[in-house]
Amino acid sequence: SDAPKTMEEALRKGSNYSTWNEWKGKYSKELQRLIDPTCDIPTGLDKDNAPKIIVRTNLADPLLDEGKKLAVALEKANAHLTLFEHKGMHCSIGASEDPESQKFMTLWANTIFHPITQAKSQIL
């Protein structure tokens, strides 16, 4: 019988895990990057003219681990990275009243509209 023998096999049977493993061998790295950005980090992120990258993680976000994984991969590539670790949910409800969200919006605005003198990589 092809019944699962372990709990892990049961949880993975027909799951996104098996679909992803089947799918990733069929398609280009560019398409894979849409699902797992760490699978193919672009080169040149360490150049002076490379874009500044902000990765925001939130403690109550189901994608917290993926955000941290992306930040680690970008840091290894010496990207101009700011990791913003927020204590809230995955969305910014009531952002105008939340000091952490205000801090993030200021960081975002300064990164987009004004050159910031900052370390190559930082965690906020």
Image: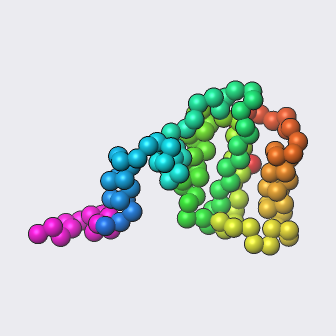
Q: Which colour scheme is used?
A: rainbow
Quarter of the figure with the N terminus = bottom left
Q: Where is residue 29 in the image (x, y as percent from the top left)?
A: 46, 42
Residue 53 quadrant: top right
How many numbered tags mark residues here? 0
> Do we see residue 42 in this rendering?
yes
Q: Does residue 1 sit above or below 119 in this rendering? A: below
| In the image, residue 81 above or below residue 65 | above
Residue at 69% x, 62% y is 87
Give the residues drawn in magenta, as a range: 1-13
Q: Could you tell me if residue 7 is visible in this image?
A: no
Residue 108, percent across and down?
80, 51
Residue at horizontal 85%, vertical 34%? 117
Q: In this view, does 16 lie above or below 120?
A: below
Outermost residue, left side: 1
Residue at 60% x, 39% y is 74
Residue 81: x %, y % from top left: 70, 40
Left-right relation of 90 to 16: right
18 to the left or right of 49: left
**In the image, what residue occupies the spot 53% across and 51% down?**
34
Was residue 2 drawn as part of the magenta stretch in this picture? Answer: yes
1 on left or right of 113: left
The quadrant where residue 20 appears: bottom left
Q: Is residue 11 magenta?
A: yes
Q: Residue furthest right?
A: 114
Q: Among all residues in the image, which is located at the extreme top? A: 47
Nearest to the observer: residue 103 or residue 77: 77
